[in-house]
Image (spheres, helix red, strand yellow):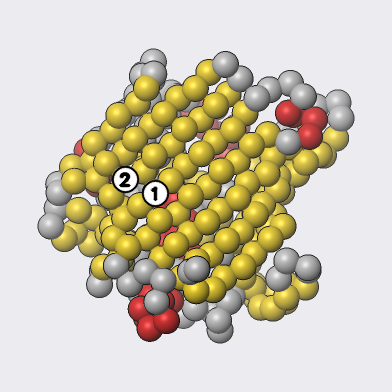
């Protein structure tokens, strides 16, 4: 669970500029809005086959001036027999005339006995990162201050995708999503593939399918040219399907799929999706 034309600078902070303001205009008119979704992961398990391996819940609250988006995920099924794994992430920020301005990203990852918390705070002209326990290294090369400033946190990127802040008539998928997670800086480049009609218990209606290209920028382990080429050839395709709610004003993710030549197909799909005024 993947998910900004060039970033615009204002007051030293970088925003996700808005090519389409319909979603935010609607929210401003009707008041605070809540989006709720639940997802499951179906992934290959060695010697067993494809199984449900994780579940996640997403809640986004958006008003005319502020937003908060949270994701909680946990291992499920066969994987949960062997490892206690969970992730909790929260992002808060401001809704401005230029788009979404993140203020804080808070991530807690539990992997068996290991736990790490990452805090990313956005201040004028700088992005401050606090990690406990600290990373062994910051990647090669490490993410630079300008690279941090040009990006948003992963949850703000998802919300930007959902609010269609980068969508254009020629590319309704929007993007690219420029992301910094506290260590790694990467891009998700989206390219329009097709419009489809979705018909499941979760959602019935129009949807957009987008091809996704994942680009590592900084903060990753070093790789040889041969390793980079092997990784590139391993991914046969990746795509994401977005629901077009309210005549396309909102496009929350319905499904993401990745096909690996080495290990098979990974599927992340919505099992619940609702949108309306906040309680």
Residue lying at the far front of the rendered structure: 279
Location of residue 245 in the rendering, given as x and y in whole percent from the top left corner = 58, 76
Is 149 left, or right, of 216 in this rendering?
Answer: left
The residue positioned 72% from the left and 57% from the top of the image is 271
In the depicted view, which residue is nearer to us: 191 or 250? 250
Q: Is residue 227 above or below residue 28?
A: above
State the residue position of label 2: 104
Q: In the depicted view, which residue is nearer to us: 115 or 255?
A: 115
Q: Which mark is residue 10?
A: none
The secondary element bearing badge 1 is classed as strand
Residue 17 seen from this side: no
41 to the left or right of 184:
right
Q: Residues within 10 Å of mark 2 (few under 14, many from 20)?
A: many
User: Badge 1 local density, few (<14 within 10 Å), some, or many (20+)?
Assistant: many
Disc 1 target residue: 91
* x then y, percent, for residue 28: 36, 78
Contact, mark 1 vs mark 2 (Cβ under 8 Å): yes
Counting from the top left corner in percent of width and height, residue 201 is at: 78, 68
């Amino acid at each position: 669970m993947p998910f900004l034309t060039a970033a615009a600078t204002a007051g030293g902070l970088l925003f996700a500029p808005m090519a389409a303001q319909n979603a935010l205009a609607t929210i401003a008119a009707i008041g605070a809005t809540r989006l709720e979704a639940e997802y499951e992961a179906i992934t290959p398990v060695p010697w067993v086959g494809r199984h449900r391996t994780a579940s996640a819940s997403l809640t986004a609250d958006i008003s005319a001036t502020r937003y908060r988006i949270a994701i909680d995920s946990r291992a499920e099924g066969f994987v949960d027999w062997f490892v206690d794994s969970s992730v909790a992430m929260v992002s808060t920020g401001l809704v401005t005339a230029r788009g979404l301005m993140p203020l804080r990203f808070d991530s807690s990852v539990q992997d068996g006995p290991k736990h790490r918390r990452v805090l990313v705070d956005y201040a004028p002209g700088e992005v401050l990162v606090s990690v406990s326990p600290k990373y062994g290294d910051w990647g090669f090369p490490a993410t630079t201050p300008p690279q941090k400033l040009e990006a948003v946190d992963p949850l703000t990127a998802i919300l930007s995708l959902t609010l269609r802040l980068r969508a254009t008539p020629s590319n309704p998928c929007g993007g690219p999503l420029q992301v910094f997670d506290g260590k790694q800086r990467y891009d998700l480049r989206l390219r329009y593939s097709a419009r489809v009609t979705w018909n499941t218990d979760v959602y019935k209606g129009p949807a957009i399918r987008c091809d996704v290209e994942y680009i590592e920028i900084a903060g990753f382990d070093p790789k040889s040219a041969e390793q980079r080429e092997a990784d590139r050839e391993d991914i046969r395709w990746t795509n994401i399907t977005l629901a077009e709610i309210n005549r396309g004003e909102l496009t929350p993710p319905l499904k993401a799929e990745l096909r690996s030549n080495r290990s098979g197909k990974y599927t992340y799909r919505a099992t619940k999706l609702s949108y309306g005024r906040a309680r």
